[in-house]
Image: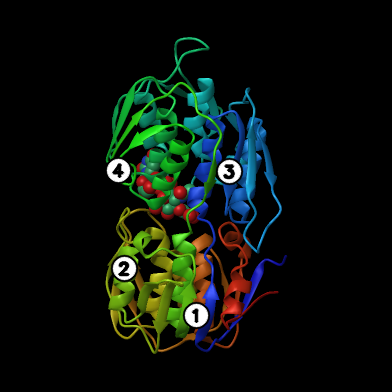
């Protein structure tokens, strides 16, 4: 497949689309399969590059990963067969491609008492350490050293030693650190309490899967999670929740181009704050029996938006919000509170005529009536998708290079937008 999207202006969008399974749930559910020997089945796992990379991580660890045939146009099930003996290592080549690979750390320590995981480097969002993961896991008894670019963890006390439940207080409600400690705690001796836990719907989805494997978890989805460790878990079957960020992409597309679109599988209760902001922009979104329906007409109104951990407005939605604001009526201020340097797509939007000034963690966006098509480069996954949307409201042709970033988290973005009436192709 080519590495570019070619986008031309679109009229109002109409029709129905599916978000598909959530990337940031599927990746953790896949890692969780390492916790029990046997055959697990995950349903609704999207066909995206990050899932392929996580499959490679699991294969390197010794699991067998197989896509079962698709039925009724649904994304296929993923069969993960976990052996009794694991190779407790996530190699550099794979972690380097996807930092979410670090979520195998908790399961490996819990299952084998040891783990060698390549340390993720810097990425497009700036410096993203894993200190909260390591501190959390060390409260459960793991000891860590850094050797040759790898974080090497072990549970002291010999081959049969287990992690021990404890009270873990997170300095910040890190999403993947919560996943890692939760997955470690389910097989630890005794009770673990996680305070200031991340509350994302994907954490709750992981907890539900772990519960169906036999784990004993209370409070997932809140900032206080309690886990009573068990000796062993059994394989299970689970359906991945819908991807709220992909759903938001289609809501934003309709907000930009106008129209009447239903995102069939989206869940309003996973996106409350965003829907509130979209409403304030004049983009009406309502949950009906057919799914989440968005109706929009004319330019959006400007609003101020600050990203915060869930249930705040997710940082992942921000490129779509900035793109909406770039053609909105008025001035909006967007503040990033999670990642440093997550404004790189803004330079590209500026090349398309957007009037955006960034100052540290803030962007001041003065809406212009229309953007102007240009060659641009996707800096990362969500920024790339936002540039595709920007092209729909830009005069002339927009060529978005670096489509591989978008493939990490979107299955057939161009096809799905085309089905709604947009003029987006891979060429
Ligand atoms: N942080 C630390 N130390 C840590 C962990 C995090 O300082 O040990 C800092 C980070 O540097 C960042 C902030 O805490 O500034 C937030 O990080 P968090 O750990 O919550 O994010 P994450 O778990 O690494 C997940 C998603 C991201 C999403 C964020 C926020 C996955 C695989 N990734 O990242 O999604 O933006 O939560 O909700 O679940 C994506 O899908 O492309 C993506 C980046």
Mark 2 to mark 3: distance in Å?
A: 30 Å
> For this view, does 140 lie left or right of residue 32?
left
Residue contact between numbered discs 2 and 3, judged by CB atoms under 8 Å: no
Give the residue number, with chain letter if any, for mark 2.
Answer: 334
Residue 316: x %, y % from top left: 42, 60
Residue indicated by mark 4: 172
| Callout 2: SS | strand
Side of 306 where 372 appears, left or right: right
Q: Is the CB–ligand 1 distance for label 1 below 8 Å?
A: no
**Numbered circle sitting on residue 352:** 1
The type of colouring in the image is rainbow
Inter-mark Cα distance, 2 to 4: 21 Å
The picture places residue 144, in percent across and down from the top left corner, at 44, 23
Residue behind label 2 places its C-beta within 8 angstroms of ligand 1: no
Q: Position of residue 151 (x, y in %)?
A: 50, 29
Q: Label 1 near label 4: C-beta < 8 Å?
A: no
Disc nearest the viewer among 3 and 4: 4
Q: Badge 3 is on which residue?
A: 96
Q: Quadrant of the C terminus?
A: bottom right
Front-most of residues 319 and 379:
319
Which residue appears at 62% of the width and 38% of the height? Answer: 57
Cβ of disc 4 within 8 Å of ligand 1? yes
């Amino acid at each position: 497949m080519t590495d570019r999207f070619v986008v031309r202006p679109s009229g109002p969008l109409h029709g129905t689309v599916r978000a598909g399974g959530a990337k940031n749930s599927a990746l953790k559910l896949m890692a969780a399969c390492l916790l029990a020997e046997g055959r697990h089945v995950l349903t609704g796992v999207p066909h995206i590059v990050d899932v392929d990379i996580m499959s490679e991580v699991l294969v390197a660890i010794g699991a067998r990963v197989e896509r079962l045939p698709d039925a009724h146009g649904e994304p296929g099930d993923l069969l993960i067969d976990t052996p009794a003996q694991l190779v407790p290592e996530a190699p550099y080549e794979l972690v380097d491609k996807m930092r979410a690979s670090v979520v195998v750390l908790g399961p490996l320590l819990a299952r084998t008492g040891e783990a060698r995981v390549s340390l993720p480097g810097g990425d497009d969002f700036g410096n993203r350490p894993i200190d909260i993961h390591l501190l959390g896991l060390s409260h459960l008894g793991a000891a860590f050293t850094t050797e040759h670019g790898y974080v090497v963890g072990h549970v002291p006390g010999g081959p049969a030693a287990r992690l021990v439940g404890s009270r873990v207080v997170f300095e910040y409600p890190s999403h993947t650190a919560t996943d890692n400690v939760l997955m470690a705690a389910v097989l630890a001796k005794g009770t673990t309490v996680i305070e200031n836990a991340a509350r994302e719907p994907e954490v709750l989805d992981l907890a539900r899967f772990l519960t169906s494997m036999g784990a004993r978890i209370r409070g997932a989805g809140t900032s206080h999670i309690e886990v009573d460790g068990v000796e062993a878990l059994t394989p299970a079957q689970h359906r991945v929740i819908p991807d709220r960020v992909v759903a938001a992409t289609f809501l934003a597309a309709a907000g930009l181009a106008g129209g009447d679109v239903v995102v069939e599988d989206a869940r309003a209760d996973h996106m409350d704050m965003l829907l509130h902001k979209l409403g304030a922009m004049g983009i009406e979104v309502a949950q009906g029996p057919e799914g989440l329906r968005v109706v929009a007409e004319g330019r959006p109104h400007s609003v101020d938006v600050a990203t915060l951990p869930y249930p705040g407005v997710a940082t992942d939605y921000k490129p779509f919000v900035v793109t909406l604001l770039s053609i909105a009526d008025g001035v909006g201020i967007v503040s990033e509170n999670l990642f440093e340097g997550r404004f790189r797509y803004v330079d590209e939007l500026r090349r398309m005529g957007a009037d955006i000034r960034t100052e540290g963690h803030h962007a001041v966006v003065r809406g212009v009536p229309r953007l102007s098509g240009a060659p641009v480069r996707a800096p990362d996954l969500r920024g790339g998708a936002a540039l595709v949307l920007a092209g729909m409201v830009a005069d002339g042709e927009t060529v978005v290079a670096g489509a591989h970033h978008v493939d990490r988290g979107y299955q057939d973005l161009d096809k799905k937008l085309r089905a709604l009436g947009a003029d987006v192709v891979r060429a």
